[in-house]
Image (cartoon, rainbow, N blue to C red):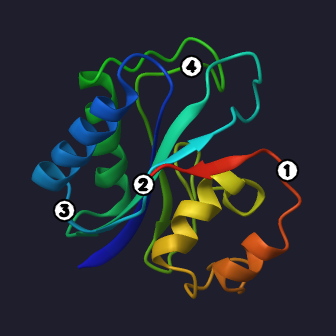
C-alpha cells in the first residue's frame, strides 16, 4: 500500500459539489481516503482573470501504482465535466497528484512530486494542514519549512 496526496480544485459551477463528488469517487475507485484538509478559497494561480478556486487535499491509501492512479484521476475528471481547453483555465474539477509515498517520478505524463508543489501556497497550505512534517522527496525538506519559506503571495483563505 502507498499513500498518495491529491489536490482537488474547482472554480466552475457548484465547486463544493464537484469536490465532494470527486472525493467520493476517489474513495470508491482509487483508494481509502485517510485524511482530508479543510476547504480553502484561493486566488487563481497562473491565469488571474478567472473566478477563485476552492481547493482541498486528500491523503489516500492506494494499491494502485502511480500510472494507474493517474489514469483513475483523469477518468474522474472527465466524468465530472473537466474540459482541457487552455492551460490553467477555469475547470469543474482538477485533481493533481502532489506526492506518491516518497517516490520521485519524472515521466512525460507524470511528474511526482508535483513540479510546482513547493511554489504554490494553494497546494502547500492544505497539504501542510494534514502532513506538515512530511519530507519533500526531492528537496529533502519538511513541507512546513517549504510553506514558511514560500514567496507566493497569492491569498489562501480557509473556509472550513
Above or below, 107 relative to 145: above
- Please state the total of marks drawn on the protein image: 4
**Under tag 1, what secondary structure?**
loop
Discs 1/4, front? 1
Q: Which residue position is annotated with label 4?
A: 90
Mark 4 Cα shell of 10 Å, populated few (<14), some (14-19), many (≥20): many
Which image quarter: residue 65? bottom left
Q: Position of residue 96 (x, y in %)?
A: 48, 47
Q: Which residue position is annotated with label 2?
A: 160
* Rendered residue at 27%/31% (across/down): 17
Disc 4 versus disc 3: distance between alpha carbons?
27 Å
Discs 2/3, front? 2
Disc 2 versus disc 3: distance between alpha carbons?
24 Å
Above or below, 46 relative to 143: above
Disc with the residue nearer the chain's start (2 vs 4) = 4
Q: Which residue position is annotated with label 3?
A: 31
Mark 3 Cα shell of 10 Å, populated few (<14), some (14-19), many (≥20): many
Discs 2/4, front? 2
Q: Position of residue 134 (x, y in %)?
A: 55, 84
* Rendered residue at 28%/24% (across/down): 80
Image mark for residue 24:
none
Amino acid at each position: 500500500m502507498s499513500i498518495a496526496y491529491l489536490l482537488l480544485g474547482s472554480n466552475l459551477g457548484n465547486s463544493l459539489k464537484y469536490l465532494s463528488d470527486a472525493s467520493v469517487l476517489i474513495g470508491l475507485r482509487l483508494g481509502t481516503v485517510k485524511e482530508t484538509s479543510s476547504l480553502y478559497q484561493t486566488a487563481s494561480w497562473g491565469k488571474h482573470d478567472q473566478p477563485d478556486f476552492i481547493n482541498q487535499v486528500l491523503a489516500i491509501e492506494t494499491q494502485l501504482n502511480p500510472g494507474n492512479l493517474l489514469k483513475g484521476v483523469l477518468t474522474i475528471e472527465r466524468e465530472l465535466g473537466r474540459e482541457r481547453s487552455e492551460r490553467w483555465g477555469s475547470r469543474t474539477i482538477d485533481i493533481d497528484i502532489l506526492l506518491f509515498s516518497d517516490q520521485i517520478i519524472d515521466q512525460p505524463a507524470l511528474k511526482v512530486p508535483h513540479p510546482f508543489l513547493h511554489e504554490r501556497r494553494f497546494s502547500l497550505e492544505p497539504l501542510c494542514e494534514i502532513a506538515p512534517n512530511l519530507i519533500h522527496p526531492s528537496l529533502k525538506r519538511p513541507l512546513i519549512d517549504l510553506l514558511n519559506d514560500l514567496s507566493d503571495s497569492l491569498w489562501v483563505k480557509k473556509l472550513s
